[in-house]
Image (cartoon, rainbow, N blue to C red):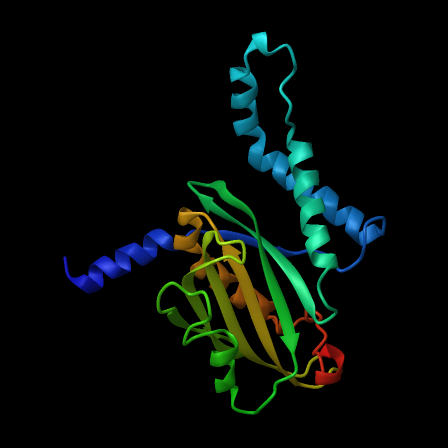
Amino acid sequence: MSGTEQADDLRALMRVPWHWEWVPQTGPGQAEHREWTARVVALFEAWTAEGLDAGRAAWPAAAGTPFPFTAGMLGREAAGWLGERAAALPPWARLAWGAAFLGGRPRWAPVPVVVEFAEPEAEDPNYLMETVGARGMEGDAREPVVDYVTTAIGDGLRVFALCRSPEGAACARLHAALRLDVPPRGGVASVSTDVLLSTLVFETGLMAVIGDGVEQLMQQIAEECAPADAGPARLGFLAATQEGQS
């Protein structure tokens, strides 16, 4: 088998399906947030039912207490954790969360990704390579791996590097950037926006698939900004000005 064939096989193994969605910008107690929380709980109930049933069956009677976990509990904790992270973001940023599936079952969830929408600083988007650390960042353990991404309404890149967290834990960073040229639709003028994505992962298995997962999110963002069916945009965003970020 040639080196090219081996690389293609490895990429096929890493291309696992992902589920991505947004954490609402509304706070707890508001209708949109309540509906989203119920949805997350329902997803986790479906995803964890089999595993929890097995854990419950193996729980020793001698423990003297009932099995301490429920699927609803896991979903509510996940929603609460994601909601807190989303609430801490500036107005021009959104929090996406994802789940990666192996053999039809969720293997990693929830995986948070911060997504920032910014007004372009220059017509030439090459400066984004520096923004996402394509040539390296402080704390990187080795030279980053850079992959280029093409969407229907703009191009970008994703950068993966092994590094250490501020607390000193071994991890990997994934930074990505897109320059999107959103066409006019529904009476809204065309607009160009830079989209910046970032996440840290700590599990070795997740490191192997996070790059392709974030690329799937990048494609989803482009599709939600300008649906292929020419329908209304499903993703609204605030293109932050320099004054708004100060």
**Residue 7 visible in the current orientation:** yes
Q: Residue lying furthest top in this view?
A: 62
The quarter of the image holding the C terminus is bottom right
In the picture provided, is 198 more to the left or to the right than 9? Answer: right
Q: Residue at x 53, y 67 (%)?
A: 218
Q: Residue at x 68, y 55 (%)?
A: 85
In the picture provided, is 70 more to the left or to the right than 173? Answer: right
Q: Residue lying furthest left in this view?
A: 1
In the picture provided, is 19 more to the left or to the right than 189? Answer: left
Q: Residue at x 69, y 80 (%)?
A: 185
The quarter of the image holding the N terminus is bottom left
Identify whether 105 is placed above or below 146. Answer: above
> Quadrant location of residue 140?
bottom left
Q: Residue lying furthest bottom in this view?
A: 123
Q: Residue at x 56, y 92 (%)?
A: 123
Image location of residue 11, percent across then percent down: 33, 58
Viewer-proximal residue among 145 and 71: 145
Image location of residue 43, percent across then percent down: 63, 41
Identify whether 114 is placed above or below 60. Answer: below
Image location of residue 160, percent across then percent down: 42, 64
Identify whether 121 is placed above or below 231. Answer: below
Number of numbered discs overlaid on the protein picture:
0
**Residue 235 visible in the current orientation:** no
Image location of residue 17, percent across then percent down: 46, 52
> Quadrant location of residue 2?
bottom left
